Amino acid sequence: MNTKLTAAVIALMLLPSVSMAYCSGHKEITASSCKDGMSWDQAKGECTLTPTT
């Protein structure tokens, strides 16, 4: 039983590190992340050039 308990404690200790590593590469692109002169196109799901007149 001592081995199982030790393994469970180690797994719980590593869980936050693993979850942070998994999420660190994910970057959500939204309208607020568009550069100047660009606007969010909802249909395409990306920033597009805003025409100027």
Image (cartoon, helix red, strand yellow):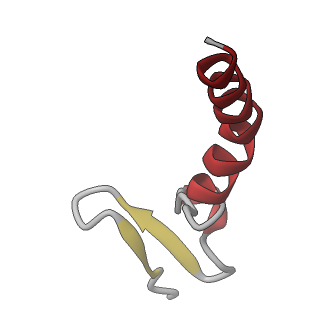
Q: Please say if 43 is above or below 37.
A: above
- The correct choice, above or below, for 33 with respect to 53 in the image is above
User: Residue 49: x and y, percent?
Assistant: 45, 85
Residue 31 or 24: which is nearer the viewer?
A: 24
Residue sitting nearer the eye, 14 or 5: 5
Marker count (numbered): 0
> How far from the left and from the top, in percent, is residue 29?
52, 62
Please name the residue shown 57% across and 63% down the image.
Answer: 27
> Could you tell me which residue is drawn at 64 percent across and 49 percent down?
18
Q: Residue at x 22, y 59 (%)?
A: 43
Residue 24 x %, y %: 66, 61
Query: Looking at the figure, which quarter contains the N terminus?
Result: top right
Q: Is residue 41 left or right of residue 1?
A: left
> What residue lies at 66% left-to-right and 37% top-to-bottom?
15
Left or right of 33? Residue 50 is: left
Between residues 29 and 18, which one lies in front from this camera angle? 18
Q: Quadrant of residue 11?
A: top right
Q: Quadrant of residue 41?
A: bottom left
Toward the left, the furthest residue is 43
41 left or right, relative to 2: left
Q: Picture coordinates of residue 52 (x, y %)?
A: 52, 87
39 is higher (above) or lower (below) than 42: below
